[in-house]
Image (cartoon, rainbow, N blue to C red):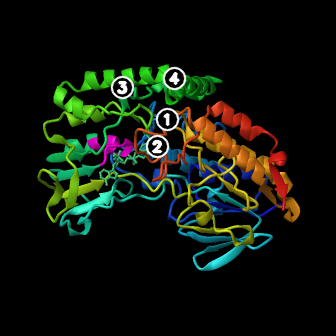
Amino acid sequence: MTPRVAIIGAGFGGLCMAIRLERAGIRSYTIFEKAGGLGGTWRDNSYPGAGCDIPSHLYSYSFEKYASWTRRYPEQPEILGYLEHCADKYDVRRKIRFSTEVTDATFDGSRWQLTASGTTEAFDVLVMAVGQLNRPRLPDIPGMDDFAGTSFHSSRWDHSQDLTGRRVAVIGSGSSAAQLIPPVARQAERLEVFQRTPNWVIPKPDATFNAAVRLAFRFVPGLQRAYREYIYRYAEATLYPALARGWSEDLLRRRALNHLRDQVKDPELRARLTPDYPPGCKRVVIDSRFYPALTRPNVDVVTDKIVRITEKGVQTTESVHEADTIVYATGFRSTEFLAPMRVTGRDGVDLATRWAGGAEAYLGIAAPGFPNMFLLYGPNTNLGHNSIIYMIECQVNHIMNCLPHLSDGRRLEVRPEVMDAWRRRLDEAMGRMVWGDGCRSWYKTADGRVTNNWPGTTMLYRRLTAKPPRAAYREV
Ligand code: N01
């Protein structure tokens, strides 16, 4: 009997899983989606300027080429449009239960019992596709409730607010802030950027595709595939080595410092924007509009420590910065994988308790004690240098290879010794990467364990996930 599959989340991961099942003729699946629409992070993040710093043709499924991309780096509406297109073309939308949040997933000894909107339903296989950057992290600054103006998180943009002529404070200076600051700076009367730590920034060579290029992508056989392959290999060859300590780190540093020198002429501002930790330790910002926006006469970069939020604005150690609107571009609760869902495995093991010291999973996909449960974009599968969609497709392939072993009520669980060997392998590889010390980042837990990033090449990950899965798992 074909297993019943529950997929949680209708973003890039969940839709990929559904499409692959659909194409394999497996129709016994349901997608649970807590929001009213599909798209995941690309539905949530609709702030002005939202987009992707990975090229369009690479930030898409390998099986669904898309001739409609209008630019080299896609903006949020186009990415969301692509996902809508995929959901319709492969006819998976009918399988999505919108506005249905799974709150509990409990393994009852033979199947997974999912509780959503007060009802409980049994499934044989559980695919968690909730992403890593799905829960906003608001900062813990005293007085936030006292603010008399409007405030919101970058991923919950309040589109009812017209920022024209307003005084805006943006707290944070990561990738989201870098994208939203240029358009907001053009609108606002005054924009103050509260930067706690500067980022390494490298150029984003964006361009629109003219009609001839788009026609060529549509009609020249093999062109999209060849272009995609080229940009994939280029990212792998240039950025990945820079995340491993060594000579290539210096190349990245030089590239970023040249970019800063080219775009910011004021030495005092340049000094404020120059990081003092190794490039790549935090996610490198890839953007060519951020620095020019910071040099505008109506924009200021504030580096004084924030003390509290008052009724009027942001109080630092030096002064009060009055504002009408505060944007918290302060990132996500990235290390709390799967939260706030309660996940209970075999013998009543609570996953959050198991992961209290940091989330971990074999290949980022499977955890001992949690039979027939798989994660997409799980622990240690994030990239700082290439497309996450590539990783997601590797994970979906792996799950598809497991599925034939899960029919007729059979259950697979990753062997504990395989998980131990995996952990040792990761620990050893982490020592070679730049993420460990020298900076604070969303890649790691408060006590410094890197739970989010994959420390190898994507080609290695593909090889590992493509291995026949049976040896790593046992039947339970
Ligand atoms: O979040 P972040 P993000 N007081 O965590 C600051 C992806 N993404 O939403 O560095 C003051 O990177 C914090 O300061 P510090 C991409 O992978 C991709 O910008 O911790 N400041 C930092 O500056 C990215 O990495 C695209 O000292 C506080 C900022 O807030 C990830 O999403 C586009 C603070 C948070 O930066 C997250 O990016 C956009 C406090 N209390 C995003 N707390 C693509 O193009 C936090 N900060 C694919």
- Toward the viewer: 388 or 159? 388
Instruction: State the mark number for residue 78.
Output: 2
Image location (x, y in percent) of residue 202: 38, 28
Q: For the stretch drawn in magenta, what is the main secondary structure? A: helix
Question: Which mark is first along the chain, 1 or 3?
Answer: 1
Q: Are discs 1 and 2 less than 8 Å apart at CB?
A: yes
Instruction: State the mark number for residue 256.
Output: 3
Question: Which mark is first along the chain, 4 or 1?
Answer: 1
The answer to whether 3 appears left or right of 96 in the picture is: right
Question: Which mark is first along the chain, 2 or 1?
Answer: 1
Q: Please, what is the three-letter code of the amino acid marked with disc 2?
A: Glu
Q: Nearer the viewer, mark 3 or mark 1?
A: 3
Disc 1/disc 4 C-alpha distance (Å): 24 Å
Disc 4/disc 2 C-alpha distance (Å): 27 Å
Q: Quadrant of the C terminus?
A: bottom right
**471 falls in the magenta region:** no
Mark 4 lies on a secondary structure that is helix
Q: Please, what is the three-letter code of the amino acid marked with disc 4?
A: Thr
Give the residue number, with chain letter if any, for mark 4. 238
**180 falls in the magenta region:** yes
Res. 156 visible in picture: yes
Query: How dense is the environment of label 3, judged by Cα within 10 Å: few (below 14), some, or many (20 and up)?
Result: many
- Toward the viewer: 255 or 243? 243
Query: How dense is the environment of label 2, judged by Cα within 10 Å: few (below 14), some, or many (20 and up)?
Result: some
Q: Nearer the viewer, mark 3 or mark 2?
A: 3
Q: Please, what is the three-letter code of the amino acid marked with disc 3?
A: Ala
Instruction: State the mark number for residue 69.
Output: 1
Q: Which residues are magenta?
A: 172-181
Q: Are discs 3 and 1 less than 8 Å apart at CB?
A: no
